[in-house]
Amino acid sequence: MADFELVMPKMGESIAEATIIKWSKNEGDAIGADETVLEIATDKVDSEVPSPKGGILKKLLFKEGDVVAVGAVIAIIAMEGSAAAPTAPAPKAETTTEVKAAVVEVEKTIAVAANTASNSGGDRFYSPLVLNIAKEENISMSELETIPGTGNEGRVTKRDILAYVQNRSTTPATNAAAPVVELAKPVAPAQPSTPAVHQAPKVTLMPGDEIVEMDRMRKLIADHMVMSKHVSPHVTSFVEADVTNMVKWREKAKKVYEKREGEKITFTPMFVECVVKAIKDFPMINIAVDGQNIVKRKNINVGMAAALPSGNLIVPVIKNADNMNLVGLTKTVNDLANRARANKLSPDDIQGGTFTLTNVGGFGNVMGTPIINQPQVAIMATGSIKKKPAVMETEMGDVIAIRHMMFLSLSYDHRVVDGSLGGSFLKRVADYMEAWDVNREI
């Protein structure tokens, strides 16, 4: 085949679409193999998309700002050595044979929903994500047309449809079956279409106020956080850990390690090691929920929340953390943190997480109640380490000593993780921290 179809790549778990930020090449430009053609963005990460083949960029099928389904053809490249490409109408986007079965299923769902929309006579654009949510919540296209949109040109965003679903579930009339139209008529004047309690409060501007528009990543993070709270009933447990041995060991080992390896050792890989041990003891923390099914993860992939220079957060993932020793964990943590700060993470670096660790202590906070990183079911926060007087049991009796103490907090999905499991897991993490061998070799 003389032409090569460049498709929207799969960017991570549960991601069905991406936004084209910028085309790096124009029609007619020469492209080398592995040369960047465009930049895209999802709610996880920004990324460059290279071309696997060299040639001439024959046709761009989407504009900057367009939201495109994973697996859809986004550009046509006339491969090197092929005849000059004649001018022709834009080719129809097709799924290539390289697209995985999961992507095919996503596109089938999108195609069915899009066909329903066109048959209903509507001309309003809906993103694949919104259409998928509508399908899962049994929202018809005629009903979807009535949802107010806050996006560009009145587009329905993920936040819009999730808010509608929440309001819909609390309105008795929407719970009825087909005869709902007849049943609703007598009470329609007494029922508001949207309960005011679920509406975002109107903001009144005051003298001196400044309006700052959210950047794209902040908007996506906001949507993701609202979605997580909507999906999972959150419960948070707390425990205080004596990490004196960890502090003493690190003080002794950090200079030796830095001289030998040329990099610093932080508390993060030490915390990750303790978390991994506890997950092995309580594997039902390392799961995901798929409808009415529980997915037990074989791999232990620990996400570590990292702050970006912009103030936004991103969660790179330590893959197969249970197969690494402390040196391996340290090198992986440092590499991911450095590339996150330099905005050099690849899509693979931020996908596949099964459990997340976030360090609120880095901001001087003693504890926090983190929001679950879907589709995971638990996230643990480590607070700042403080010197405090603590009671210690000794052979000679109880004594009060100055110890390094830290609060741990675990937010978990109460659909599948009850208080016994969540609390026991968190206490086990603390136990491993307190049992750290101060004479351990590195």
Image (tube, rainbow, N blue to C red):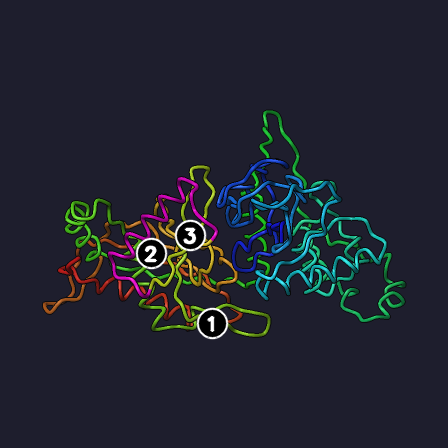
Instruction: Check contact, mark 2 vs mark 1: CB within 8 A.
Output: no
Q: Identify the residue under disc 3.
A: 316
Please tell me how crowded label 2 is: few (under 14), some (14-19), or many (20+) other residues with Cα within 10 Å: many
As drawn, the residue found furthest toward the left would be 396
Q: CA distance from mark 3 to mark 2?
A: 23 Å
> Residue 292: which quarter of the image?
bottom right
Task: Return the residue nearer the eye: 122 or 439.
Answer: 122
Among the 4 quarters of the image, the one containing residue 436: bottom left
Residue 96 at what x, y percent from top left?
A: 62, 58
Name the residue located 75 percent from the left edge and 44 percent from the top edge. Answer: 89
The local secondary structure at tag 3 comes to loop
The numbered mark at residue 418 is 1
Q: Residue at x 56, y 37 (%)?
A: 30
Name the side, left or right, on which 264 lies relative to 351.
Answer: left
The kind of residue tagged 1 is Asp
Could you say whether the residue bearing mark 2 is in a helix, strand or loop?
A: strand
Which residue is painted at 35% across and 45% down in the image? 362
How far apart, in angstroms, are the residues tagged by discs 2 and 1?
Answer: 20 Å
Which residue has dot 2 on it? 407
**Res 86 quadrant in image:** top right
* Percent of width and height locating residue 406: 30, 55
